[in-house]
Image: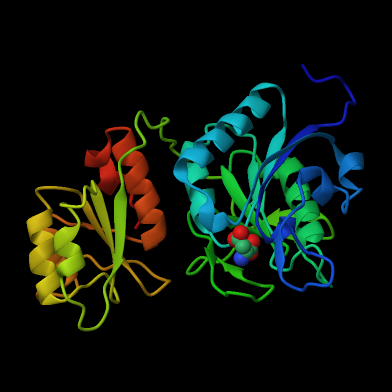
Amino acid sequence: MKRQGAMPRLAIASLGGTVSMQAGSGLSAVRPELGCNEQLAKVPQLREMASLEVATLGMLASASLGFAALLDVLAWARGEVERGAQAVILTQGTDTLEETAYFLDLLWPFDEPLVMTGAMRAASHPGSDGPANLLAAAQVALAHSSRGRGVLVVMNDLVHRAASVRKAASLALAAFESPGCGPLGHIVEGVVVYRLPPGRKEVLPLPHHIEHRVALLEACLDADTALLQGVAAQGYQGLVVAGFGAGHVSAAWSTVLGQLVPVLPVIVATRTGSGPTASASYDFAGGEIDLQAKGLHMAGRLCPRKCRILLWLLIGTGRQHLLNKWLPW
Ligand code: DAS
């Protein structure tokens, strides 16, 4: 139970990434070396804002995170809220932040915010953005207006929804965008301002099994069908295709995808990075009308990488038949 006037409890954990990286002496290349307490040492204000529960859960480049590790992180975060944390912050690498945030969002059952952040410049580099992002993440996490919004990504004083955020630049400081809809909010003088009220959000149960795999292949000019034909034989239980334009593939790919439909669920998304797939505009072999007639699912606004995460979690809970309900138009 919370004491009157007591500081809010904030749980913070780090997983690795550039925010935890620094250069060794005499070197300029960086690697993960800083645990969570060392990252927090650069933001002393945090200890005046909240009583902190701190954990270093990993020290990895985010390309090496995986679903099993994320389920462990989720268990830690859920435990912290159950023990009274008002919010949770995770710091990690930015390379997979758009995927990990969506994964956790689909499973986050609380009104308490789970806020994720990282850095584009390592801790040992001039103008490192990690401390500023951590402070902004805490301001967002502790704001009452952040409740009921699921998992939020805070980078560069912007707040993004897990379902729409995307790393859109490899090295730029302003690397994160929410294509098509813009950020959900921004931070001005330490205060978060949202453009929209919280929306109702459905959450998936925890997966009962995690050994299954979902493949992601990108359509490209003059691609043969060899990899596509091998998907089922390689033991994948689902497939996402990052299609051309509004969710299209070549006529040859369409034929093979049609053969895969009785064997595994297939989603076709757009590889463009912005905008929805079409549903009733194009009537050619490999267009969305043909693909839907063959039993493929169109991704709507969900990007290919997030489609793969959604499909993996739905298969893990035996809910793949509900796929269309979960794909946002
Ligand atoms: N590109 C790095 C980062 O921005 C590495 C990583 O994702 O771990 O954090």
Q: Is residue 131 above or below residue 173?
A: above
- Along the line of sight, which residue is nearer the eye, 244 or 203? 244
Q: Using residue 324 as the reference point, say whether residue 86 is left or right of it.
A: right
Can you say whether 77 is above or below 84 in the image? Answer: below
Residue occupying the far top of the picture: 1
| Residue 190 vs residue 175, the one in the foreground | 175
Residue 328 visible in the shown view = no
Q: Is residue 309 left or right of residue 42?
A: left
* Residue 205 lies in quadrant: top left
Note whether residue 3 is visible: yes
**Rendering coords of residue 248 (x, y %):** 22, 72
Residue at 85% x, 19% y is: 3
In the image, is residue 112 above or below residue 161?
Answer: above
- Classify residue 241 by image quadrant: bottom left
For the N terminus, which image quadrant?
A: top right
Q: Position of residue 225 (x, y in %)?
A: 15, 70
Location of residue 323 in the rendering, given as x and y in whole percent from the top left corner: 27, 45
What residue sits 78% from the left and 49% below the top? 139
